[in-house]
Image (tube, grey):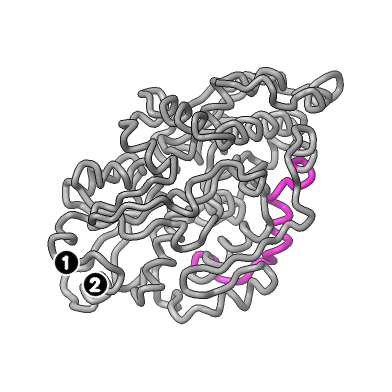
Amino acid sequence: MTDSSTPINDALAWVAGSDAPEKSALNLGFMALTDSASLIVAATQGFAQPYGLSLNLQRQASWAGLRDRLLSGELDAAQTLYGQVYGIHLGIGGPATPMAILMGLNQNGQAINLSEPLKRGGVTTGEALSARVRQGGAKLTFAQTFPTGTHAMWLYYWLAAQGIHPLEDVSTVVVPPSQMVAHLRAGRIDGFCAGGPWGALAVEEDQGFTLATSQMIWADHPEKVLGVTREFVEQYPNTARALTMAVLEASRFIDENEENRRSTAQLISSSDYVDAPLSAIQPRFLGQYEDGLGHAWLDAHPLRFFADGQVNMPWLSDGMWFMTQFRRWGLLRADPDYLAVAREVHQLELYRQAAEAVGVKVPEQAMRRSELLDGSVWDGSDPQGYARSFAIHARSNDTAIAL
């Protein structure tokens, strides 16, 4: 699958002599998700070896387990949820451990699915869901994948945009992504927010429908990142840089053309990696959506891994956004120094070195501007004000998801 024309000559200057990786064999954690593709490609298709690395892929059963193995050192680096890195760094739900983000792995590609019983009951729009919630009775139960993770934040944000308070009007539980469809089938949950291919598989197996995609909430939103502990970066800076270069090369390869995306979808569908039917992976991997309600479309903001480096840039404003949502929902009881924390976590200089070495453009500014589905604009300029700007938020007597 590798393309021999990729510009690696300059990059090799970083992996020779005193710049050689301090640690050459790395255990790399990933989850059974479509957006683990760049790590799988980097490890299996020859992108790591030129940089003096051997990547041992280790599939994890849950985000909590991945976190524990990353912190114990059993994993050297991992596909991690953006918000998960910040939750660990800030000590939400456990002891604070300094963390580091090397690069972004993907944007877009997550989904909010509801159950077949809700579909049969005519709850097929946000308005209908809001009306169903206002009727009272037993609370609906929605699953997400980790308390401080992206899926919890997308679910909370989307529900609130429909006028549904995620901490009061519904119940939420944590379920590993690969178990979402089984929980939906068993009637233990009424809906979920998770990454692919699990939303598509629920549709394919007539166990639910996609009511919203994450890119509908925030077009080209941040999602998974390449995460390590701060200790790892400090102990193995050359290794961290080499790993970033390898994954950048793999990311560029995937997004280079449709043929590469198709071959990557085939690769990751195997039992060693995502272990799901290609029919549930490839269409949304290519931006082709069917929602289970009779609608099909080619998404303008599909799952993407590179986009000329826009995906991979560790934007400070992206990390700051997750902290504003932690503050909004009571996971943080006080405002942190948003920008200072982001600068601690994001390894901007290391990323710049890696990107320039492999010929990837690096934006001059580390902030970007986005408009979300409720009309709010986020650019990182006033995080405290932004966190306080939402009509629906945690109240003092609210209890967020158990950590």
Task: Please give the range of residues in magenta.
Answer: 330-351
Q: Is residue 41 left or right of residue 299?
A: right
Q: Farthest residue in the right direction?
A: 18
Q: Which mark is residue 122?
A: 1
Query: In the rendered structure, does residue 349 fall within the stretch colored magenta?
Result: yes
Q: Say whether residue 100 is visible.
A: no
**What is the quadrant of the N terminus in the image?**
top right
Query: Element at badge 1?
Result: loop
Query: In the rendered structure, does residue 322 fall within the stretch colored magenta?
Result: no
Instruction: Tell me the amino acid under the disc marked 1.
Output: Gly
Q: Is residue 163 left or right of residue 64?
A: left
Q: Compare residues 121 and 236 and report the one nearer the observer.
A: 121
Q: Is residue 212 above or below residue 79?
A: below
Q: Which mark is residue 128?
A: 2
Q: Compare residues 384 and 276 and report the one nearer the observer.
A: 276
**What is the quadrant of the C terminus in the image?**
bottom left
Which residue is pictured at 77% across the width and 40% down the height?
350
Q: Is residue 381 above or below residue 260?
A: below
Query: Element at badge 2?
Result: helix
Q: Are marks 1 and 2 in contact (CB under 8 Å)?
A: yes
How many residues crowd around disc 1 within 10 Å: few (fewer than 14), some, or many (20 or more)?
Answer: few
Which residue is pictured at 54% across the width and 74% down the height?
376
Which residue is pictured at 43% across the width and 38% down the height?
34
Q: Which mark is residue 394?
A: none
Q: Position of residue 334 (x, y in %)?
A: 59, 71
Instruction: Tell me the amino acid under the disc marked 2.
Output: Ala
Which residue is pictured at 20% across the width and 41% down the height?
205
Q: CA distance from mark 1 to mark 2?
A: 7 Å
Q: Is residue 296 left or right of residue 350?
A: left
Q: Position of residue 328 (x, y in %)?
A: 51, 71
